Amino acid sequence: MRSNIFIMATCGLIVVLCPPAFGQRAAGPPSQGQGNPTDDPVRVLVGRLDLERYKATIKGLTEFGDRRQGTDRNRAAIDWIEARLKSDGCANTERIKYMYNPPPPQPPQGRGGPLGPVIASGEIRTGSGGSRYRGITRPTGANNNPEAQADVKLRELNSQPTAPGPREEVYCTKIGSTRSDEMYIIGAHMDGIGWGEAANDNGSGTALVMELARVFSSPDVQTERSIRFALWNNEETGLSGARAYVEQRVDLQGKEDPPASGRYPEPTWLGMIQHDMMLWDHGMPRADGTLSPEQRPEADVNIEFQSTAKLADQAMKLAFFFRDANEKYATDYPAAVGPHMTATDSTPFMDLVPAISLRENERGMHTGAGWNPHWHQPTDRYSGFSDKDFRLGLNAAQTSLAAIAQLTGATLRK
Ligand SMILES: [Zn+2]
């Protein structure tokens, strides 16, 4: 097993270090005037992302309320996502099936409800993933109180409780033209909690993955390597859906089935890229616990790897490759790299394959410190976000699309 991991890691490293040749002539920023931008397939593909389309996909997901796992609204959302993937041309949809039988209910976790006191001190306070809190922090928690949702219609939509039992999650695959036995996995979780619409957590990441599936599935787009677009379920219960995927499919990697068919049901994993909460970067809470109502002008996409992962070095290189793709191709917001990836569906992959996450904030130091007041709250609604917020998610989409287009050798048929 260990040697397999090492070989996969080396492959991933080579891919990261040696993007396909066309990547070398990717155009720089338009101001540098490097030839006709329409000659660069990456730039053409990035141009097919659109703010209004991205917003409309998020809006579509919010029609299913908070999409809590183990409910009819969650199952209906999976059906809707699958239908959209198919109609957008990502026709090879499949489902992972697994059982989710949680331990008996515990007293509600987290503080929920109104926010508590503000903390500011010079002491070292640690957060998840190895992070350190700085400055002003606010308590966080998941809302479990239906009455906290003032909108009666939405409260009703979210009222069916979760039940243990069988679960499903959907993915679709763009099959590579010459290296169909290798793939990158592009993921986001589609389930949510908190009695809102899970617009940001994680309609924003789910819509991003769906928009990438649409662009890469266009009939005139060819990629050498395969790309799998995965919409995980049960993230909010502890990454259960992504864990089920890894358990069921890790040993199928790279196997041709049936033999000599040229078909690889599970192409070898080259990297896993997760998207989780993409919209909100309003900065640190103020001393009085309030937050800026506006996206901060310095907002950025936070790309994280986990420094304790077995493949940390390769994941770090992958993260910086994404950062570079952002610098070349994203229109508005920059990206930053950090070493504390945590608490999202890339975690079950990180010792097997280079794995990174893209988010609005660093998960430990920022999200964990209460920078997003809508996180797992009834206020996580489509109407609570501005175009400046949605545009941060669009820039994350541009970043991932540009990086994956290069890593998979994307070209356009004339
Ligand atoms: Zn999330």
Image (cartoon, grey):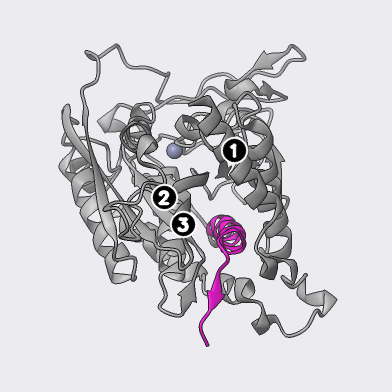
Q: Which residue is disc 1 drawn over?
A: 9
Residue 217 lies, in percent from the top left, at 41, 70
Q: Which mark is residue 267?
A: 2
Looking at the magenta stretch, what is its main secondary structure? helix
Q: Residue at x 30, y 35 (%)?
A: 248
Q: Evaluate if marks 2 and 3 touch, with contact meaning CB atoms under 8 Å apart.
A: no
Q: Residue at x 63, y 23 (%)?
A: 308
Q: Evaluate if marks 1 and 3 touch, with contact meaning CB atoms under 8 Å apart.
A: no
Q: Amino acid at mark 1?
A: Ala
Q: Which residue is disc 3 drawn over?
A: 208
Tell which circle, 2 or 3, labels the residue nearer the N-terminal end: 3
Q: Quadrant of ligand 1?
A: top left
Q: Residue at x 65, y 44 (%)?
A: 13
Along the viewing direction, whichever of 381 and 211 lies nearer the viewer: 211
**Residue 286 sits in quarter:** top right
Count of numbered marks:
3
Residue 353 lies, in percent from the top left, at 53, 37
Q: In terms of secondary structure, where does tag 2 sit?
A: loop
Q: Is residue 262 left or right of residue 329?
A: left
Q: Amino acid at mark 3?
A: Leu
Q: What separation in Å lies between label 1 and label 3 (alpha carbons)?
A: 27 Å
Magenta region, residue range: 390-414
Q: Amino acid at mark 2?
A: Pro
Q: In terms of secondary structure, where does tag 3 sit?
A: helix
**Viewer-side label of 1, 3:** 1
Q: Is residue 407 magenta?
A: yes
Q: Is residue 414 left or right of residue 62?
A: right
Tell which circle, 1 or 3, labels the residue nearer the N-terminal end: 1
Q: In terms of secondary structure, where does tag 1 sit?
A: helix
In this view, which residue lies farthest toward the bottom?
Answer: 414
Tell which circle, 2 or 1, labels the residue nearer the N-terminal end: 1
Q: Is residue 211 left or right of residue 65?
A: right
